[in-house]
Image: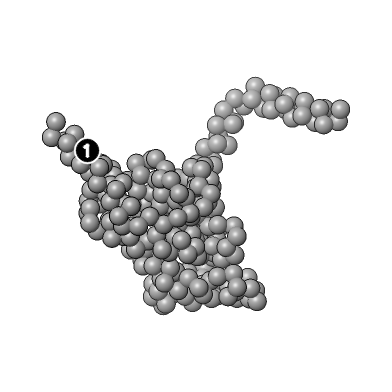
Amino acid sequence: MRVQFTILSFLLLNLIITIIHPQSKWIVQAQLIPAKFDGFVYGNPKKFNPESILIEAFFDPVCPDSRDAWPPLKQVLHLYGSKVSLVVHPFPLPYHDNAFATSRALHIVNELNSSATYPLWESFFKDQNKFYNSETSSMTRNEILDHIVDFVTKSVGHAYQSDVKSGFSDRKTDLKTRVSFKYGCSRGVYGTPAFFVNGFPLPDVGSPVDYNGWRKVIDPLVSSKREYEYM
């Protein structure tokens, strides 16, 4: 009975708020929407082609399968050139202890120098073992953050060290990393790597796609687009 009363009270309160402030729920929802689209555009964002085939990838910086998925995807991007665009969304898996902090580092660096974002992705993938759970299990949270800051500055340049360190105290970078995770969840992502092509998910979430696999996906789309343009 008490539970029913609580639910009834909640519904009544919600009704009163809606009557008094009918736009309030839309204001709350708008505040949850980020100011810009999540993710990092591969290449020069100013040259992003909205007419190209769009690949969206959800990667965890400390996920071995994400690491293995990157080389064939990069190879395919170079093959198709401007016909294909890529946006990578950080998706920190909760069972990787350092996934959120390394994803946050990517957001920090992207704000400082967007041209350094993908080199940092590749640095994390190359030396991923330094951030595995077992490697940092005896370290405190502050020691891990210092470890990440040192690693990042070696990758992007020591001139950024103070800015990278202060970035971890900036609430905005924390929120951006949370938005990346929530955005992935809103798209139904539950593991990495996960891929979407022109908005449609590819099967086998959590498994890398090799070069031939990408060719099988992209080649027909390029051919179809060429036929459409000549109609």
The kind of secondary structure element at disc 1 is: helix
Residue bearing mark 1: 224
Task: Identify the residue at horizontal 69%, vertical 28% (top origin).
Answer: 14
Most foreground residue, 136 or 144: 136
Q: Quadrant of residue 113?
A: bottom left
Kindly tell me whether residue 167 is visible in this rendering: no
Query: What's under tag 1, amino acid-wise?
Result: Ser
Task: Identify the residue at horizontal 35%, vertical 48% (top origin).
Answer: 55
Task: Identify the residue at horizontal 82%, vertical 27% (top origin).
Answer: 5
Task: Identify the residue at horizontal 47%, vertical 64% (top origin).
Answer: 64
Q: How is the image coloured?
A: one colour
Q: Is residue 157 above or below residue 6?
A: below
Query: Measured from the top left, where is residue 99 in percent x and y?
Result: 54, 62
Mark 1 crowdedness (10 Å alpha carbons): few <14, some 14-19, many ≥20: few
* Quarter of the image with the C terminus in it: top left
- Relative placement, left or right, of 9 versus 136 is right
- Relative placement, left or right, of 159 versus 49 is right
Q: Is residue 202 above or below residue 140?
A: above
Find the residue positioned furthest to the left.
230
Query: Measured from the top left, where is residue 57 in percent x and y?
Result: 40, 52
Kindly tell me whether residue 62 is visible in this rendering: yes
